[in-house]
């Protein structure tokens, strides 16, 4: 049995491998495409392969790709992985911690991993649209607050929807004519 702890980044993955009950091997850094080819070779060699990574802003594509290869891939809640409180966070340490937790999980300790439900691709797209809208609304509200603050600082009475042309321009004392 092969276990993979994966620390996911946009351009690359840091992976720690544990074969059977042996100690985890030193971390390896892979480009995305190279990792998938490597993982496919591991699976083709006939071993049972398990993988784990933390949920992040890159979605669940990696989980789907690994599952398509026949690899049992688990996605977990992001968490503080520095159990020894060394206050050092590196990709290698995170990948190793994930691998060790996966080892305990595969051995039957269901509490070793805080699993996340992997949404369907359609659900993930709907979530992305909703989250993007929320980010835009938050940014607009921050800009509204900054605008009101500027109005107060310049002696202008703040008004609702100040950014709209029909609201701001007729009342703005700095407008010529």
Image (spheres, rainbow, N blue to C red):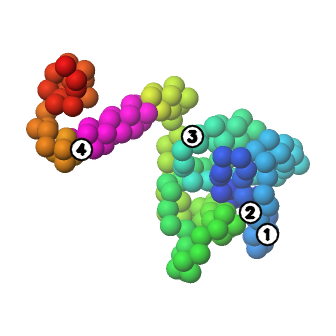
Closer to the camera, 117 or 125? 125
On the image, numbered disc 2 is attached to which residue?
A: 16
On the image, numbered disc 1 is attached to which residue?
A: 26
For residue 60, what is the image quadrant? top right
On the image, numbered disc 4 is attached to which residue?
A: 150
61 versus 176 height, above or below: below
Few, some or many residues within 10 Å of mark 3 (<14, 14–19, 20+)? some
44 versus 176 height, above or below: below
Quadrant in which the C terminus appears: top left
Kindly report the distance in space between the C-alpha atoms of the residues bearing marks 1 and 3: 26 Å
Does residue 95 appear to the left or right of 166 in the view shown? right
Does residue 105 appear to the left or right of 136 in the view shown? right
96 versus 10 height, above or below: below
Of callouts 3 and 4, which one flags the residue occurring earlier in the amino acid sequence? 3
Q: What x and y, as percent, mark residue 57?
A: 54, 44
Which segment is the magenta one? 130-148
Which numbered disc, 4 or 1, marks the residue closer to the eye?
4
Few, some or many residues within 10 Å of mark 1 (<14, 14–19, 20+)? few
| Cβ atoms under marks 2 and 1 closer than 8 Å | yes
* Residue, far left: 157
| Cβ atoms under marks 3 and 4 closer than 8 Å | no
Kindly report the distance in space between the C-alpha atoms of the residues bearing marks 2 and 1: 6 Å
On the image, numbered disc 3 is attached to which residue?
A: 59
Kindly report the distance in space between the C-alpha atoms of the residues bearing marks 3 and 4: 39 Å
Few, some or many residues within 10 Å of mark 2 (<14, 14–19, 20+)? many
Give the residue displayed 47% in from the left and 32% down from the top: 128
């Amino acid at each position: 049995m092969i276990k993979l702890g994966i620390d996911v980044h946009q351009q690359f993955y840091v992976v720690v491998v544990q074969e059977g009950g042996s100690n985890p091997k030193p971390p390896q850094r892979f480009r995305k495409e190279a990792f998938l080819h490597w993982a496919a070779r591991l699976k083709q060699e006939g071993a049972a392969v398990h993988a784990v990574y933390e949920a992040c802003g890159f979605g669940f594509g990696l989980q789907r790709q690994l599952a398509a290869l026949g690899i049992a891939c688990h996605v977990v809640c992001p968490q503080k992985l520095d159990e020894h409180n060394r206050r050092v966070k590196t990709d290698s340490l995170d990948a190793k911690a994930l691998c060790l937790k996966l080892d305990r999980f595969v051995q039957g300790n269901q509490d070793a991993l805080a699993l996340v439900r992997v949404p369907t691709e359609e659900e993930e797209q709907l979530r992305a649209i909703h989250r993007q809208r929320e980010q835009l609304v938050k940014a607009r509200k921050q800009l509204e607050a900054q605008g009101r603050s500027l109005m107060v600082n310049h002696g202008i009475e703040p008004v609702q929807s100040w950014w709209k042309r029909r609201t701001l321009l007729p009342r703005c004392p700095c407008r010529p004519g």
